[in-house]
Structures are given as C-alpha cells and as structure tokens.
Amino acid sequence: MADQTTKDDKPLFGRPWIFIRGVPAMKFLPPEGPLEVAFAGRSNVGKSSLINALVGHKGLARTSNTPGRTQELNYFVPEGFSGETGDLPPMALVDMPGYGYAQAPKDQVDAWTRLVFDYLRGRATLKRVYVLIDSRHGIKKNDEEVLALLDKAAVSYQIVLTKTDKIKAAGVPKLIAETAEKIRKRPAAYPEILATSSEMGEGLEELRQAIRQTVGIAA
C-alpha cells in the first residue's frame, strides 16, 4: 500500500470523512480490508475532540463531558468510498471506548472492556494504536495495564499527549522526556512521543504525518 493516494488524488486529511459504523460486538466488525489505526485512552482524555480536529470536522466524533460516552468501536473513513465496486477506502480511523472511569453500570463497562481487548488481539488489519494520555495527569495505572496488554498482543502503539494547552509550555518537553523514559523498555511501543492540543491545533500535522507513514499513504 506504499505511496497510495485516494482515488481522486485529494490528500488523505484534505477531504471529508464520514462515520460508517458503530461496533458494539466483534460480530459487527466491518470486513477486514483497509488498514486501520485506532485511538485509545482513558475516559474523557479527549479522543473524540482529537479525531475531529485531525480531520477538520467538528461534529464527526461525538464529544461529551460525560466520561465513557463512547460505548462502541466507531469507524470513520474518507468520504467517497462505497466498497461496492472494489473502491475500498485507503484506511479507517477507529475511536475506541474509553477505559477507566465511566458513568455506566459495571456490566456495561465490562462489556466495553472485553470488546476493546478482543479487537486489539484479533484484528489483522489494525496497524497501530495511538494511546492518548492527558498531559495534566501523565501515564496512570490503568494506562499501564493497557500498554501491557498491547505489548502482550504485539500491537504497535504510540503515545499521544493531549490537552498540552492546559499545562505550562515549559513543562511539555519535560513531560515528553518523562513519558519516553516510562515506555523505553516496552517492546511494542513506538519511541517518539507526540504532543497535541485539539483546542489550539498544536501537533495535529505531526500526528497526521505519523498516521500517513504508519499506513504507507503519501501526503
């Protein structure tokens, strides 16, 4: 899939993106085809806001102040690819349910958790998981549990710091260095740490470039 562009040669992130499917259980996953990159993180880490900023579409991924709002694997693809005539999208973005605290019954949270873990272990087209970490809190215990799962499943992942506008600018390089040291010995971790702010638009182009390189698509 190296050096592939979309069928009308528009840049990957320079065209509209659309929501195609919410997946509440593994049996509802789309057929494996285009490569996928997924976004994981604690509840309320800012996944939906980051995805919206990434593709320039404020209302694509649903955002909420209520932790745990995303309850399914939500699939997004560039607009204009039906798949009916073989015109598969070049890639898909997957917004995963937040882990950690969620205002929902325990059995429902457990069901989300099983869905996420089953997806991570069993999806051959999953190219990389971008694990979002709130800059104000750093890597917490349940983040470490997810990183350990990704290591065990041999799923490549990269840390993306969110909400960097909420901390002092001078503290960002230090946080990047501290985070890089924490994941240094983790076998499935990509070593480069990305720092972003959805609100300020910071780090978005670096994240877009990282995704393009991950799935082998030209800018």
Image: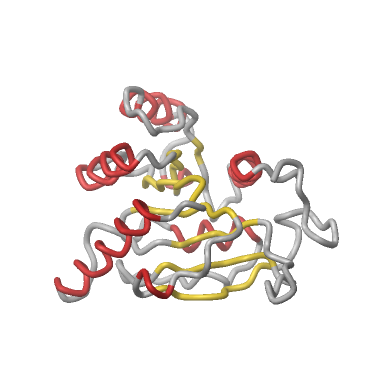
Quadrant occupied by the C terminus: top right
State the colouring used for the structure image: secondary structure
Residue 77 location, x and y as percent?
A: 62, 65
Q: Is residue 58 left or right of residue 124?
A: right
**Is 63 in front, or is 108?**
108
Q: Residue at x 38, y 42 (%)?
A: 135
**Is 127 in front, or is 135?**
127
Q: Quadrant of residue 218?
A: top right
Residue 45 location, x and y as percent?
A: 37, 55
Vertical relation: 21 (above or below) 101: below
Q: Residue at x 72, y 55 (%)?
A: 12
Q: Residue at x 28, y 46 (%)?
A: 146
Residue 41 location, x and y as percent?
A: 36, 53
**Is 100 in front, or is 82?**
82
Residue 196 location, x and y as percent?
A: 52, 44
Query: Which residue is at the far right?
Result: 8
Vertical relation: 46 (above or below) 60: above
Number of residue marks: 0
Vertical relation: 179 (above or below) 113: above
Q: Quadrant of residue 46?
A: bottom left
Q: Is residue 100 left or right of residue 84?
A: left
